[in-house]
Image (cartoon, rainbow, N blue to C red):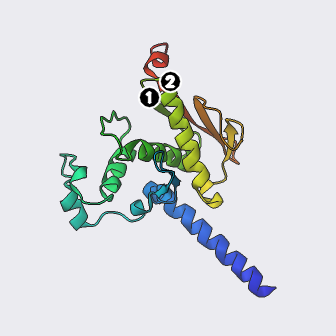
Amino acid sequence: EEELLARILLLEIEEADDCDRARADPAYLVSHMSAPDERTSETFTFEHLRTPLTEEELAAIGTDGGHQWFAANDWRWQRAWFDWYYHTKRSITCKARQEGITWLACGAHVADALIHPGSLLLVYRQKEEEAHENIFRCWALLESLPPHLWMGAKIEKPSRVAQPIPTEELRLRFPNGKASRILAMTSASASGH
């Protein structure tokens, strides 16, 4: 019985340390997310974000202001992009397809919503269907996290079902009563504000 209690205590300490690390480094939180590739159905992860870039990687990727992230030969350039994107208050990203940027941005929004209860995050897309798709992506990434990295949050909207009906909002409620919201908006809905 003592051994079991010791294991439980050790697990609780490890999970608390994991949460502290995720709060200090949002890319670490995103590195625990995964989702199915929409073309192949194979699962992809962001494990390559788990550790900060080394000086050598920074030099190879070329993050000297020219934003030449794609110069790297592997997916580690995504760590440079994520660090830039997460710490930029507002951004408009013109991107190529199949580079994972939309998924990575959705991961950043989920991380922000979890790390900062009470956050309001807006995701703009041109078409309503695409905007709702991003909410689904945020949902899928959130669902892929181990429960302890949810930081105590519960999904309030959309209602908790296996496959959510596309909606324009993902709302998380925290034990302290605060709610984080990720809203999908289109250029048409934004013009009404």
Residue in front for this viewpoint, 82 or 102: 102
- Image location (x, y in percent) of residue 34: 51, 55
Q: For the point 20% across and 54% down, which residue is it?
A: 71
Q: Which sits in the foreground, 120 or 104?
A: 104
How far apart marks 1 and 2 lie (CA) works out to 9 Å
* Crowd around label 2: few <14 · some 14–19 · many ≥20 (10 Å): some
* Residue 125 horizontal side relative to residue 174, left or right: left
Look at the image and tell me whether residue 21 can be seen.
yes
Q: What residue would you read off at disc 2?
A: 128
Residue lying furthest front: 40
Q: Which residue is located at x 50 percent, y 36 percent? A: 134
Question: x, y percentage for residue 183?
Answer: 54, 31
Q: Is residue 46 left or right of residue 164?
A: left
What residue does disc 1 label? 124
Closer to the eye: label 1 or 2: 2
**Viewer-closest of 73 and 31:** 73
The kind of residue tagged 2 is Glu
- Give the crowd class for mark 1: few <14, some 14-19, many >=20 residues within 10 Å: some
Residue 120 seen by the camera: no
Expressed as whole percent of the image width and height from the top left, the position of residue 21 reads 50, 63
